[in-house]
Image: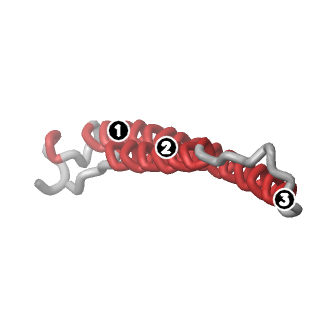
Amino acid sequence: MSEIKSSLTVAEEISVQFSQVASGFLAVNEVIDTAERTTVSGNTNAKNSLASLHNRAQRLSNALTRDGNNIHSVAKEFSAIDQKIKNSFELSPYSSSLGGGKS
C-alpha cells in the first residue's frame, strides 16, 4: 500500500522563510531617515516618496506574514486530513493487516 504523507515540516520551514522576508522589509523600513532641516526644492518629493515606500513595504510585509501563516494553517489541515485517510485505510477491509489487499 502506498504511503499517505503530507509534509508539515516543509510548510513550517516555508512559513518561517516568509516571516524572515517580512522582517527584512520592516528592517529596511526602519533605516529610512529624512532630512528635516533642509529646504532643497526636491526635499518634499523625497519625503513623499520615502513615505510611500515605507507604506508599501509595510503592506508587503503584512501580506507575507499573513500568507506564511496561511501556508502553515493549510498544511496543518492537510496533515490532519491525511491522518484521517490513513487511519481509514488501516481499518479498511482491504487493509493488508486484516488479510486483504497486497503487502
Q: Residue at x 23, y 56 (%)?
A: 2
Indicate which label's residue lies in the foreground, 2 or 3: 3
The mark lying in front, picked from 3 and 1, is: 3
Q: Is residue 62 left or right of residue 27?
A: right
* Residue 67 at least partly seen: no
Q: Say which label, 3 or 1, has the lower sequence index.
A: 3
Observer-nearest residue: 62 or 39? 39
Camera-nearest residue between 51 and 101? 51
Camera-side residue: 59 or 30?
Answer: 30
Residue at the bottom extreme, as displayed: 42
Q: Are marks 1 and 2 in contact (CB under 8 Å)?
A: no
Instruction: Classify 63 as above or below 90.
Output: below
Amino acid of disc 1: Gln
Badge 3 crowding class, 10 Å Cα cut-off, few under 14, some 14 to 19, many 20 or more, is: few
* Spot occupied by residue 103 in the image (x, y as percentages of width and height): 11, 54
* Among the two numbered marks 1 and 2 on one chain, the one whose residue lies closer to the N terminus: 2
Mark 1 burial class by Cα count in 10 Å: few <14, some 14-19, many 20+: some
Q: Is residue 20 left or right of residue 40?
A: left
* Residue 81 in the image, given as x and y percentages of width and height: 43, 40
- For discs 1 and 2, the disc positioned in front in the rendered view: 2
* Residue under the point 30% across and 50% down: 4
Number of the label disc, if any, that sits on residue 19: 2
Residue located beneath label 1 in the image: 83
> Residue at (31%, 42%) from the top-left corner?
86
